[in-house]
Amino acid sequence: MNISIDVKETETKLAIKVTGEIDAYTAPQLREKLFPMSEKEGVKMVVDLSEVNYMDSTGLGVFVGVFKNVRAHSGEFKIVGVSERLERLFEITGLADIIDINSQIEGGVQ
Amino acid sequence: MDFREMMESKYRDILHHYIKEQSEQALYAGQKFSRKSIEHKVAPEEIISLHKSLLLEMYPELPKDIIHSFDILLEVMVGYGIAYREHQSLRHQQEELRSEMEIASNVQQTLLGTSIPTVPGFDIGAISVPAKHMNGDYFHFVLDENDNISVAIADVIGKGIPAALCMSMIKYAMDSLPENRLDPSSVLENLNRVVEQNVDPSMFITMFYGMFNPSNNIFYYASAGHEPGFYYDSKKKEFSELVARGLLLGVDKRTKYSQYEKEIFPGDMIILMSDGVTECRTEEGFIEKETLIGYINKYIHLNAQEIVNNIFRELEKLQHFQLRDDFTLIILKKDV
């Protein structure tokens, strides 16, 4: 079970691409990488999950934590490339109502 | 006689024996000797030093160069000896931790214990099995003085010990809610405030709370991001999702929860679960809702407790008896 987290910083945002599986074993790595970024004032983060083939609720916990941090620091947080299955997870947990999921963003995330 | 005292003569015999005839039997004696010496905590370098002195004794003419070479082997083995002793002490610590964990898990079971109430007109079955020692799932039944049956099912996002500790807090928060009857939506709103204030910012709880009122046969329910349960309509023999929208507990303290209701007729069922049920993953992928419904149908003629037990056994088998997540399944069946 592997995960790779690729961060590209541009002038306007932090584009984060996650590849692999997000579960209880890999979630701590994701948290360690994302948490420090999320605490920067006014940060704009876009997380691309299109290459994530499995995510359980532990991964969801990481994103909620990051989202709360970003919001507390008046930043913006978006998740894109969410598969149908993951989208259901965001729907059920009510997170789809507060986190920007799969919206079109200018210039894409590549 | 102590092993250490006879170690030298034993090793001498084995060595002699093998030098005389290179037999399997002599090698086997060497294996047995090594097991004994490990048992008596003899360090590897001690054996080399023994080997060296015996060689000198048996072959006084042995070239000095060969004898010197043993000093290097001895030095190298000192490191192995240290690593081995560290390993032994870690194993010992691991044993200690394991037994502490078992105690903790027993304490948790006592703390979170809930009994399945016997309610006239209702058949209730529940099963909750942790993936590891400690369970991050929780369910709770309350029967109040007006015969309302309340049921809560919750799942901490996260597993293992932190999740279990968090769940104990939820249990006490629920116990300390005001005595008078509360609507499912107000229960969730209360708990949400508790979780928001007291729990680590990346730990969240999903909860489904339902209450059946026997005087009007209505099941009132609300959900905080929990896996939707099912409603079984016995007249149509159909299952439908008990859809309820609501945010996870602990994200935003101002969250409001909508309350839903469903009239329950004799023979109908309410099926509640944790995501360990639907996230049950097999080699072919996740199990589909249809698979789960298939199992419920297969055992529908049994009583509620037997249904949940059998479904657990089937899903456990599908996952080759390796649960990835805590598993909880509850069935409330209205008597015909």
Image (spheres, coloured by chain):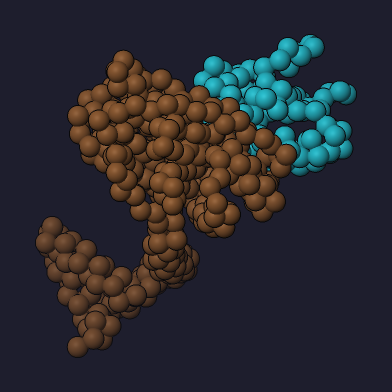
Judge by depth and name the residue closer to the eye, B1 or A7. A7
Place residue B322 in its image quadrant: top left
Residue extending farthest to the front is B215
* Quadrant for the N terminus of chain B in the image: bottom left
Measuring from the top left, give residue B127's x and y in whole percent: 33, 44
Q: Position of residue B333 (x, y in %)?
A: 31, 34
In the foreground, B205 or B214: B214
Q: Residue at x 14, y 69 (%)?
A: B17
User: Residue drawn at (31%, 39%), measured in percent from left and top?
Assistant: B122
Q: Please give the name of the residue rendered at 67% of the width and 21% of the height, measured from the top-left corner.
A: A101
Q: Is residue B252 above or below residue B287?
A: below
Which residue does the image show at 80% across and 28% down from the upper left?
A76
The residue positioned farthest toward the bottom in the image shown: B1
- Is any atom of residue B156 visible in this view? yes
Q: In which quadrant will I find the C terminus of chain B?
A: top left
Q: Position of residue B172 (x, y in %)?
A: 54, 57
In the rendered image of this protein, which colour is used for chain B?
brown
What colour is chain A?
cyan
